[in-house]
Amino acid sequence: MVLNLDKNLKIYYSISEVAKMFDMNESALRYWEQEFPTLKPKTSGAAKIRQYSEKDIEQIRLIHNLVKVRGFKIAAAKKIINANRKGVDKTADVLKTLMEIRDELMSMKEQLDGEFI
C-alpha cells in the first residue's frame, strides 16, 4: 500500500471543479469529450457522474491552451495534437510554468504595494 503524504491531493475531480479550474462551462467540457477521443473521464453510477483524473486534467489543459488561449478551432487543435503531441505537451507545460511565475510575481507586487502605502 502506498502512503499518500499530500492530503490535498485528490484522485478524482467533478466536472464542476474542472470547469471552475479552467473558467469554462461544464457543457464545453462535455463537448470536448465528444470531439477529443483521448479525453475520457471515468463515469460512475447510473447517472454517469464524470470523475476527472490528473491525466484527464492535463489533457484538458492541453486542449484549453490550443482552443481558448491560442485561438485554434477544434478541428485545427485535433490535427495539432495528432501530428505533434510531444511538442504540444511541451508548449502547454511552458505556458503553465509562465502563468505560475506571473501569478507569483503579481502576488509579490501586491505585497510590496501594501508595504509602501
Image (cartoon, rainbow, N blue to C red):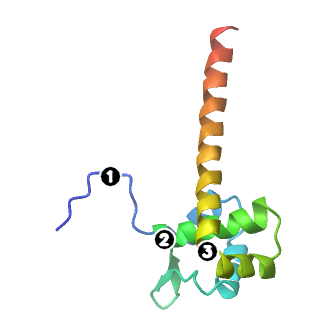
Q: Position of residue 17 (x, y in %)?
A: 57, 63
Q: Position of residue 24 (x, y in %)?
A: 72, 64
Residue 7 — which label?
1
Task: Name the residue rendered at 69%, 65% in the picture.
Answer: 64
User: Considering the image in quadrants, where does the N terminus appear?
Assistant: bottom left
Contact? badges 3 and 1 (CB < 8 Å) = no
Callout 3 environment at 10 Å: few (<14), some (14 to 19), or many (20+)? some
Q: CA distance from mark 3 to mark 2?
A: 14 Å
Q: CA distance from mark 3 to mark 1?
A: 32 Å
Looking at the image, tell me whether mark 3 or mark 1 is earlier in sequence order. Answer: 1
- The reply, left or right, for residue 53 in relation to residue 20 is left
Q: Is residue 98 above or below residue 75?
A: above
Residue 80 — which label?
none
Residue 55 — which label?
2
Residue 85 — which label?
3
Task: Name the residue rendered at 64%, 16% in the picture.
Answer: 112
Callout 2 environment at 10 Å: few (<14), some (14 to 19), or many (20+)? few
Q: Position of residue 57 (x, y in %)?
A: 55, 67
User: Considering the image in quadrants, where does the C terminus appear?
Assistant: top right
- The reply, left or right, for residue 9 in relation to residue 88 is left
